[in-house]
Amino acid sequence: MIVVLWTDVLVWLLVAALSGYAWFVHRREHLAAPWRRVSQSAAGMVALVVLVPYLAVGLADSLHFRPRLEARPGANAAAGRAAYSVEVLSVLDLALAPLRRNTERTYSEPFATRAYAKETVELGGGRVAREFPRLRFGGADLADEDDRGRDIVARLVRGAGLGLVVWLAGTFALVAALARGADAAYGELWRALWRGRTRTAWRAVLASAALVLVAAFATASLASGYHVLGTDKVGIDVLYLALKSVRTGLIIGALTTLVMLPFAVLLGIMAGYFKGWVDDVIQYLYTTLNSIPGVLLIAAAVLMMQVYIDTHPELFPTSAQRADLRLLFLCIILGLTNWTGLARLLRGETLKLRELEFVQAAQAFGVGPARILTRHVLPNVMHLVIISLVMDFSGLVLAEAVLSYVGVGVDPSMISFGTMINAARLEIAREPMVWWVLAAAFIFMFALVLAANLFADAVRDAFDPRVRVGAALAGKAA
Amino acid sequence: MIAYIVRRLLYAVPILIGVNLITFALFFVVNTPDDMARMQLGVKRVTQEAIDKWKAERGYDRPLLYNAGAQGAQRVTDTVFFHKSVRLFVFDFGQADDQRDIAHEIRTRMWPSLAVALPVFLVGIAVNITFALLMAFFRATYIDFWGVVLCVALMSISTLFYIISGQYLVSKLWRLVPISGYDGGLDAVRFIILPVIIGVASGIGSGARWYRTIFLEEIGKDYVRTARAKGLAETTVLFRHVLRNAMIPILTGAVAAIPLLFLGSLLTESFFGIPGLGSYTIDAIGSQDFAVVRSMVFLGSVLYIVGLILTDISYTLADPRVRFE
């Protein structure tokens, strides 16, 4: 049975809107030009190559369903309908089924074959001993534990090799496509690629793609025999947790901006264009909202939402739906506190635009304000919208972790970087230390945020040659 | 000047009223006091008497906006809105759920907050400016390029990791300072030094990068070209001319943050167990003490508005070209 969560709807709506935008831009030279500049930036393209797997994981995790339960003989037969599990799964869960199912009892180190804590084991014949028990899954294929090193290397080589093969195939396909498109000889194209002299930064793309593919395939190959990043307190594979966290981070980063965008754009350009009392009202609105420190407003709003959810349990049939609605609400609240910066920026830009000749000419021709705003002003401030969209993303991903720590973030049952860090934080005091959960959250988050930051920089440089806007946005972030 | 300040203060009044209305709507209209009581007392199996008692203890048993049962002016004043929201304007915050006076707590807790936040703020500005000047001096070289890359990398690390790794390395592994806690007097230094270092380190990425763009923007201006044409050395141009002019946006931007230093930092204070306003707020959120959260929201916006006014004043003091209108 397919389950449609609210955030899923919005995510796919966003994907559709982005595809529509890409198609729209593709056919218009003046809109495509800045994006082409992005494609020429090596740093931007490397960042994009890193972001793509994240997006793929996030999207695969945004198709939800409830699996059909195996009909038990006798039970439910009279009703004649299939029973569905209360557990809501996603397509990603299907792909990661081995990771999800192979749980241990408690903590285990990365690549461990034995548990992290001693347990009482029966040796047979009534004798018992305290020892580190073998894991149910980690290294279970090994006949002899001493073979672990050799086995890891073998799996690593197999995975990396497969990754390289895929990469080579992709590279040849790319060169073939480029050669057909440019009508050039293969040898020449290879040389241009090797020396990095292609217009689009293909060399950077291919180099980073090689790294990403080898790393991904090697991890997958290792994960088939071990817990690559260890297991957490209740024995769930940390790699699985980290991959599931990706969707939460992406949704907070993307949907928040999507939610606030209509307000910010509409109010910002209206304040700038109409001036007078409209401007006063809108400025009052955003100064008031801005004057409440963000964390406190979010905390207050989330507390109130918690009260609402707790006193109306009948509205939420499954815990996944409850967590999802809470996530959506968090996006809305974050959006409400975040739109003021963009609105102020757009107001300032519109104030300048409205004095320009083409707007005055439109006014002289008797064009209505609504049409002037949509046809003449909006297209000329779109670069600011795009810049702030990508610049805000990384900050929001970071904010999610902090808010979850404070206790006003996502639902505690929802897997996210914040909840992972929160659960692992207390274990740092243990001897020997449980470091791998934090390390996993750190690596996945750092790669995502760093890539998003670098991509945002490339987009900003391409869309706005002046550094001023960047300075203003960075100032807001600081 | 005084007329200008008075006018700015008057502008602040409607904003504070707006904040007040927003918090009132959030805390009392979205969910009625009954809902809050039910939540605090446990959702299931709670009797109406227990709810009424909870409300009476906290003064939530009045009507929200208009008391039809009262006489004269009491019709308006004997309401939740008047007691809980309007009173905030005279900084009468009422009592927390543990029966302590919130105003008193704020007065005692703001000093530890300030003891951490002020050094972070001052040292942070100094470090960021130094780092940014270095990058601006070596602009368009590998030092500048890798400096920016380092900044972006530092920006991409969550504050949580700075705090956790700092605590682990300095306190647990090297045992240099206590992991957490606070003490009055000079002893406080032992507890403050690590949070300050971490606070500064976590801010370098975004701060230094931002200041660098300000410096680069100044370097592109005409007066710099004139100074170079006069034959001044590059260091003189940078330190005498560019630095002084770039200080205008940097200082005025920093002034806005000064009043908010009183609120402290939620994360740092709760990780290091510093009894400031940040940890007070976090504890209130954790125990769902609505009165405290409401007070902190109001206090925060008051301080923000004070910061705005200070910014406008400092503009005119720092830059003689700006005049009061």
Image (cartoon, rainbow, N blue to C red):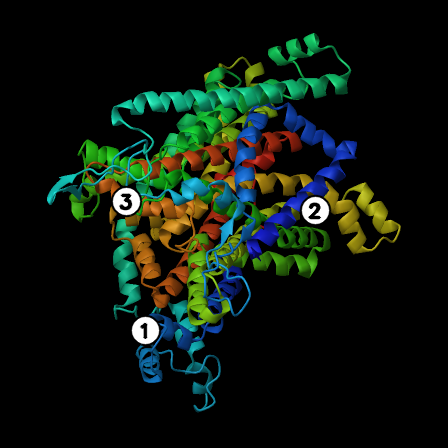
In percent of the image, x 34 and y 31: which residue is there? A141
Q: Which residue is mark 1?
A: B41
- Residues behind callouts 2 and 3 on a single chain: yes
Foreground pick, B270 / A183: A183
Q: Secondary structure at mark 2?
A: helix
In this view, B199 is above or below A370: above
Q: Determine if residue B162 is in view.
A: no
The numbered mark 2 sits on a residue in which chain?
Answer: A
Disc number placed over residue B101 in the picture, else none: none
The residue tagged 2 is: A350
Give the amino acid at mark 2.
Thr
Q: Position of residue A109 (x, y in %)?
A: 29, 35
Front in this rendered view, residue B62 or B289: B289
Residue A36 % position (x, y): 69, 27
Image coords of residue B223 (percent x, y): 58, 24
Spatial CA span between label 2 and label 1: 52 Å
Label 1 residue SS: helix
Q: Quadrant of residue A60?
A: top right
Give me the disc on residue A106.
Answer: 3
Q: Secondary structure at mark 3?
A: loop
Q: Amino acid at mark 3?
A: Thr
